[in-house]
């Protein structure tokens, strides 16, 4: 099974992309645990909650990996947790950093900020998307990850990924 990490700033189409890909390839996708956690606990989270959210994300990933077939599409991962924590609090829990360093993916897909912003009850950084996108690029490069930047409509992004996966 190949694991594909879909990452990037808020409201760049990660969830829509992961869900569409899973449907297209008849497999599982890993939803964003932070959204589930915030829906249950409210938007007033604290720094220490990010560790709980990160652990929940990886638990979901492991659960869906056990049921996936050829591909597992991960809507977010530890890179999002790292960037989120460092951007908001200026630091990141060592456990999250360790998981980011030691959990490999077969493909890293960085969603571009050309997707229109969609407001939501838990979204925070509408005006910082370009800055955050640059941080994601820098983090992927610093970690030595080969990644593909996805731009365009959902259909265009899906086509790019289908071409990559058919190679």
Image: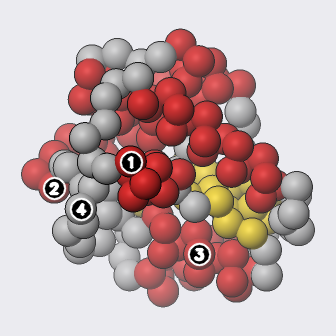
Q: Residues within 10 Å of mark 1 (few under 14, many from 20)?
A: few
Q: Residues within 10 Å of mark 3 (few under 14, many from 20)?
A: some
Give the residue at mark 2.
Answer: 126
Can residue 145 be seen in the rendering of this structure? no
| Apparent side of residue 46 relative to residue 67 in the rendered image (left or right) | left
Is 5 above or below relative to 73?
A: above
Q: In x, y percent, where is residue 91?
A: 34, 16
What label sits on residue 121 in the rendered view?
4
C-alpha separation, residue under disc 1 versus residue under disc 4: 12 Å
C-alpha separation, residue under disc 3 versus residue under disc 4: 21 Å
Tag 3–tag 2 contact (CB < 8 Å): no
Q: In x, y percent, where is residue 50?
A: 43, 31
Q: Nearer the viewer, residue 142 or 21?
A: 21
Is 22 above or below relative to 127?
A: below
Instruction: Give the residue displayed 76% in from the left and 80% down from the top.
Output: 25
Going from N to C along the chain, the mark reached first, 1 or 2, is: 1
Q: What quarter of the picture does the C terminus occupy?
A: bottom right
Instruction: Give the residue displayed 58% in from the left and 61% down from the top.
Output: 31
What label sits on residue 19 in the rendered view?
3
Q: What quarter of the picture does the N terminus occupy?
A: bottom right
Is 21 above or below relative to 126?
A: below
Give the residue at mark 1.
Answer: 41
Count of numbered marks: 4
């Amino acid at each position: 099974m190949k694991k594909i990490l879909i990452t990037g700033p808020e409201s760049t189409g990660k969830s829509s992309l992961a869900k569409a890909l899973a449907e297209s390839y008849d497999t599982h996708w890993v939803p964003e645990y932070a959204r589930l956690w915030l829906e249950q606990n409210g938007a007033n989270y604290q720094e220490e909650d990010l560790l709980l959210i990160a652990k929940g994300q990886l638990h979901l990933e492991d659960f869906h990996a056990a049921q996936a077939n050829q591909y597992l599409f991960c809507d977010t991962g530890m890179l999002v947790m790292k960037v989120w924590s460092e951007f908001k609090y200026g630091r990141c829990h060592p456990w999250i950093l360790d998981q980011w360093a030691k959990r490999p993916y077969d493909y890293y897909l960085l969603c571009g900020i050309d997707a229109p912003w969609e407001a939501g009850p838990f979204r925070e950084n509408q005006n910082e998307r370009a800055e955050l996108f640059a941080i994601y690029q820098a983090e992927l490069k610093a970690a030595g990850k080969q990644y593909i930047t996805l731009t365009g409509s959902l259909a265009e992004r899906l086509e790019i990924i289908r071409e990559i996966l058919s190679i």
